[in-house]
Amino acid sequence: MTTSFYEEEELRTIGFRKFGNNVKLSRKASIYNPEEISIGDNVRIDDYCILSGNITIGSYIHISAYTALYGKFGIVLEDFVTISGRVLVYSQTDDYGGDYMTNPTVPEEYLHVTGGLVHFQKHSIVAAGCIIFPGVTLHEGAAIGAMSMVNKDVPAWTISVGIPAKPLKGRNNKLLELEKKLKSKLFSS
């Protein structure tokens, strides 16, 4: 029976650098440079997502529909990260100043592409419609409100919102207790 997610045998043929157990990757997602992409255990990637470039996805991750991860300079999603729908994550950017040309159809000698690693630490969560720029770290437990633009690091256990995103208030870290219970349950069975 064919499902909307690839079967494990099909995932093997895509050519990922690594993929774990219980990976649910939509057949409607677009994957570029799979040899640069690692996927951990218990990951779900929904319809119409784009994954391109150097991307490391931990375990217990959900990437919602229409999200794009552009990882030329690297994107790391640690365990328990959630990314809602229509989020754009850029680890690279063209130079918009006019001294260089832009877009991937132009020969590289006429471009000036810059960027940096985008790092989502454990338990960070990004709401729908956000844009994350190159070189940003969402520290452990950071939460980003819908339609925000993140161009600076986000402190641990804060909820940030706006354009550009700024800390609004603290975020409860009780979920760390739930993580311990989950791990305890997994290792006892």
Image (spheres, rainbow, N blue to C red):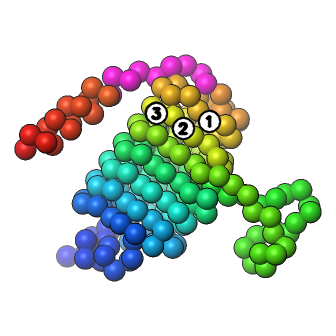
**Residue type at mark 3?**
Glu
Disc 2: CA contacts within 10 A as few (<14), some (14-19) or many (>=20) = many
Q: Earlier in the sequence, mark 2 or mark 1?
A: 2
Position above or below: 60 against 8 = above
Q: Which residue in the protein does label 1 denote?
A: 153
Q: Is residue 50 visible?
A: no
**Residue type at mark 2?**
Leu
Labels 1 and 3 touching (C-beta < 8 A):
no
Labels 2 and 1 touching (C-beta < 8 A):
yes
**Residue type at mark 1?**
Asp
x, y percent for residue 24: 31, 61
x, y percent for residue 124: 46, 37
Q: Residue at x 53, y 46 (%)?
A: 119
Instruction: Identify which residue, 56 or 4, lies in the foreground.
Output: 56
Real-space Cα separation, disc 1 to disc 3, in angstroms: 11 Å
Q: What is the count of numbered marks? A: 3
x, y percent for residue 135: 64, 47
Q: Is residue 171 magenta?
A: yes
Q: Which residue in the protein does label 3 denote?
A: 140
Residues shaded magenta: 167-175
Which quadrant does the C terminus fall into? top left
Q: Is residue 108 visible?
A: yes
Disc 1: CA contacts within 10 A as few (<14), some (14-19) or many (>=20) = some
Position above or below: 38 against 62 = below
Q: Which residue in the protein does label 2 denote?
A: 138
